[in-house]
């Protein structure tokens, strides 16, 4: 299984359920992993429980502490071949509309933090290792819908940023992918009333990340691909009738 023993993947926001599955799957492919998160204790427990200590380096990373990002990157012992931005934050749309603190936190984690650190990584032309940047976005960002447009707007902004970054880095042969993700059985969705038939498991989503190809938009699961295409094509009058 050790196909890429000399390569390193940096996972930002590595404490998410999907990111943890990515750690496992990248290691199975022979990568070394730098797992970065605010909650290093939880991440450390996961690594220990799965006997991954020899292949995983755990670092502290706060996506909203923008001033620390350059120092974090400069101090990496190895510059990464692959970078994944998996940090995410979600509050209910009704709460977001009435409490700007929740809205601000979503903006900072889902978009501003991503742009801050990924700009630093992308503009380091001295890193000849860099091959790919992958951002975890959402179906919520495809069209504005009244049930989740505040959160969706942060993901739409992130997807647009990744699309431009892909063009910016094309001349250096660095690929950029956006995972356009639907419902996942993760901590962020606990307590939400979701259609069970549409919920994906974290390891399934991780498989699409680890095996990302050349396409910019990657939509795991056939059902979600169909929903994605329908959302993109629907006229505004019909989108307005969606929840």
Image: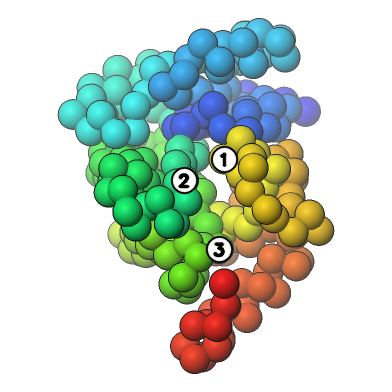
> At numbered mark 2, what does the secondary structure look like: helix, strand or loop?
loop
Residue corresponding to mark 2: 90
Q: What distance separates the C-alpha of mark 3 from that of mark 2?
A: 14 Å
Residue corresponding to mark 3: 139
Task: Establish if 25 lies above or below 152.
Answer: above
Disc on res. 2: none
The residue most toward the left is 67
Name which of mark 3 and mark 1 comes first in the sequence: 3
**Residue 131 seen:** no
> At numbered mark 3, what does the secondary structure look like: helix, strand or loop?
helix
**Depth order, front residue of 71/152:** 152
Which quadrant is home to the C terminus?
bottom right
Residue 170 placement: quadrant: bottom left
Name which of mark 2 and mark 1 comes first in the sequence: 2
Residue corresponding to mark 1: 188
**Residue 45 seen:** yes
Residue 217 rendering spot, x and y as whole percentages: 55, 64
Residue 179 placement: quadrant: bottom right
């Amino acid at each position: 299984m050790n196909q890429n023993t000399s390569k390193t993947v940096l996972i930002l926001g590595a404490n998410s359920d999907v990111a943890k599955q990515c750690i496992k799957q990248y290691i199975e492919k022979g990568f070394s992993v730098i797992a970065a998160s605010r909650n290093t204790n939880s991440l450390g427990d996961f690594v220990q429980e799965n006997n991954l200590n020899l292949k995983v380096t755990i670092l502290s990373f706060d996506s909203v502490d923008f001033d620390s990002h350059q120092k974090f990157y400069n101090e990496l012992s190895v510059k990464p071949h692959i970078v994944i931005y998996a940090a995410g934050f979600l509050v209910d749309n009704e709460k977001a509309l009435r409490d700007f603190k929740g809205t601000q936190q979503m903006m900072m984690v889902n978009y501003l933090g991503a742009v801050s650190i990924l700009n630093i990584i992308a503009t380091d032309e001295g890193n000849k290792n860099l091959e790919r940047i992958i951002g975890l976005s959402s179906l919520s960002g495809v069209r504005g819908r009244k049930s989740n447009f505040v959160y969706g707007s942060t993901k739409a902004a992130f997807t647009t940023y990744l699309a431009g970054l892909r063009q910016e880095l094309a001349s250096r042969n660095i690929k950029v992918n956006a995972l356009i993700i639907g419902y996942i059985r993760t901590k962020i969705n606990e307590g939400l009333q979701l259609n069970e038939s549409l919920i994906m498991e974290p390891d399934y989503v991780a498989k699409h990340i680890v095996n990302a190809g050349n396409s910019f938009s990657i939509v795991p699961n056939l059902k979600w691909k169909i929903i994605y295409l329908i959302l993109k094509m629907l006229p505004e009058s019909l989108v307005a009738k969606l929840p």
